[in-house]
Image (cartoon, rainbow, N blue to C red):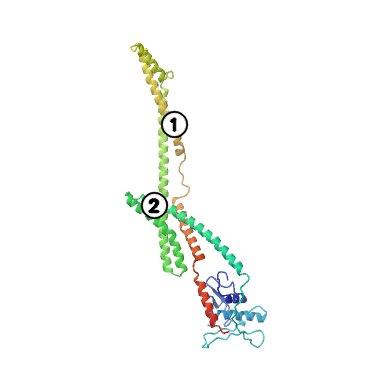
Amino acid sequence: MSAIVTTSEVLDQALRSAGLEEAFDDRGIAHEDCPGCGATGGLKLSLARGRVHCNACGTEGPLLAYLREKSDAAEWNNEPFSEAEIIPIEPRLPKAEPVLSVVPAAPEPIQAELISEAPTAPAEAPKQLDGRLGERIIMTLLALIFLGAGLAAAGLSGFANFQAFSLGVSDPTQAKIWGWSGVIASVCSFGGFTFFWWHISGGRRGEAVRALLFALAGAATSIAGTSLFMMNNAGEQTAAWQSAVDVRALTEAEISDWTRQLQGIPPETRSIEGLEAYLAGVEAAGRTHQKPYRDAQNELGLAKRRADLEAKIATARADLRQQTSVAGAQPTQSLPAWAFALMLELFSSQATSIAFVSLLLLYGRQPKTAETLDAVLDVEEELVV
């Protein structure tokens, strides 16, 4: 049985003896050719109910009796087993207890007596338990990793939604309220898909549809908020780059203008310190009325102008070097904002949903197993030994 784990050793041994241990699906259902009417796949075997039933001819009976009868018939013949060798079980008749019999290859029918016994545990049980334990450990670790990655993506999405929605309102208090609404949308998006699986696995289709709509609404809101946040940041980055380019061009023009002014000052102009020392000596000698004193004052003005221009050019060039890195790296958009938001939403919603569902399957209650155990016990109690 690929996905069915029975809890009755009697039923397990009967399934192995009949060669049907791998025939049942996830729901505990298998189909066999009906021994009564010969309908191909008409006989339905149910682990949950512990019964066999044919919709074509109405053949019905206990599953455990059918399995043992089929096993005994195969052993008597020592040949490939044929479904026609089993006498149909007819519990619909108003008899107290059904009598099970098989027809061997010999002319006279032989009745098989079913004896309830406790078979020994299969030798492969420890290996199966070890395999299931290892599988549970591996899947638990992967589920926790997926859960951490999904919650991290949900945190990023919530942060982006908070920033995007809060910028749409000027009032600070209302901005925080709308920002937190984006965080709520992110939480609803990754939680709703888990509710959808939970309801659909329980057969509650109406609630599953409502949970799916709820999850899709949260996902759409989260995608819109993240896209808006990314586009706002891209716009601010482009504006900053354009401003840096404009400032660079203006700085370069100013440097060019100051350089031209600096070139207009005679190169033989003495330094400010030398001129100030010369003027101080002339004033001490009382010859300030002479022409060299007035020429020295004019030259001092040119020296100060030269020093001022050189300081401006040096400062502008330092600023220009800082702006080069900003203006030179033009913002590029290799991935649209909506595509990035969609990826983040998928990581957030699906990773958390996969993790939660895996943990529920690993550590949740399995009602099918309990129902199968009860059905098998009922059959064993009613069986005529």
Q: Tell me what residue is drawn at x 57 percent, y 79 percent.
A: 64
Q: Residues within 10 Å of mark 2 (few under 14, many from 20)?
A: many
* Left or right of 252 on screen, residue 382: right
Which numbered tag is attached to residue 317?
1
Residue 57 lies, in percent from the top left, at: 54, 83
Amino acid type, label 1: Arg
Q: Residues within 10 Å of mark 1 (few under 14, many from 20)?
A: some
Gap between marks 1 and 2 measured at Cα: 41 Å
Tell me if residue 246 comes above or below residue 341 in the rendering.
Answer: above
Amino acid type, label 2: Phe
Point out the image quarter for the N terminus. Answer: bottom right
Question: Quadrant of the rendered structure where residue 15 is?
Answer: bottom right
* Left or right of 178 on screen, residue 7: right
Q: Is mark 2 on a helix, strand or loop?
A: helix
Q: Which of marks 1 and 2 is in front?
A: 2
Question: Is residue 54 visible in this depiction of the protein?
Answer: no
Point out the image quarter for the C terminus. Answer: bottom right
Say which label, 1 or 2, has the lower sequence index.
2
Residue under label 2, please give it.
162
